[in-house]
Image: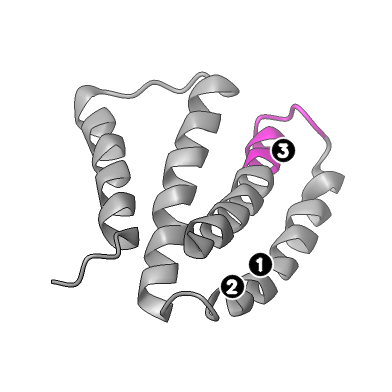
Amino acid sequence: MEGILFGTGMAMIDVLALGLLKSIHLKWISPYFFIIPVCIYAFQPFLFYQSLNFQSLAIMNILWDLISDVLVTVESKVIFHEKFNLTKIVGILLSFVSIYLMTSESAV
């Protein structure tokens, strides 16, 4: 469970930083805001380091990537109105399956 919490925390950093960068790219906000994602990302290695107390490097990295992909995809749809085809939607759904498999406690 801790892995999911740390992965979600790091993914939320991605959501905030990437959303700001997309907003700058679209000229919704000033380029001077570019410093904010840089500062936010400076905190991420510390959070990742702490997460290694609960999950292995490989599992933690995959969890972070998958949770980030799902949350950034939701952000891109809701805020930036990006479109997705059926293949991409299936890929997103498979991310949830992967997250479940990576965090299950069964020993195989």
Q: Secondary structure at mark 1?
A: helix
**Mark 2 residue type:** Phe
Question: Depth check: 106 or 85 in front?
Answer: 106
- Characterize the local packing of mark 1: few (<14), some (14-19) or many (20 or more) Cα atoms within 10 angstroms: some
Q: Is residue 84 left or right of residue 39?
A: left
Residue nearest the viewer, comparing 21 with 60:
60
Residue 8 coordinates in the image, percent (x, y): 55, 52
- Kindly check if marks 1 and 2 are in contact, taking CB atoms under 8 A apart as contact: yes
Asked if residue 45 lies left or right of residue 58, the reply is: right
Circle 2 is placed at which residue position? 48
| Magenta residues (range) | 19-29
SS majority, magenta: helix
| Residue depicted at 78% across the width and 50% down the height | 34
Residue at the image position 60 percent from the left and 58 percent from the top: 10
Q: Which mark, by number, is residue 44? A: 1
Q: Tell me whether circle 2 and circle 3 mark residues in contact (CB < 8 Å).
A: no
Under mark 3, the amino acid is Ile
- Mark in front: 2 vs 3: 2
- Mark 2, secondary structure of its residue: helix
Taking depth in this image into account, of 87 and 6 the one nearest to the observer is: 6
The residue indicated by pointer 3 is 24
Image x and y of residue 70, in percent? 43, 41
- Asked whether, in this view, residue 42 is left or right of residue 69, the answer is right
Say which mark, if any, is on residue 66. none
**In the image, is residue 18 above or below residue 73?**
below
The amino acid sitting under disc 1 is Gln
Query: How far is disc 1 from disc 3 in space, using C-alphas?
Result: 21 Å
Residue at disc 3, secondary structure: helix
Earlier along the polypeptide chain: callout 1 or callout 3?
3
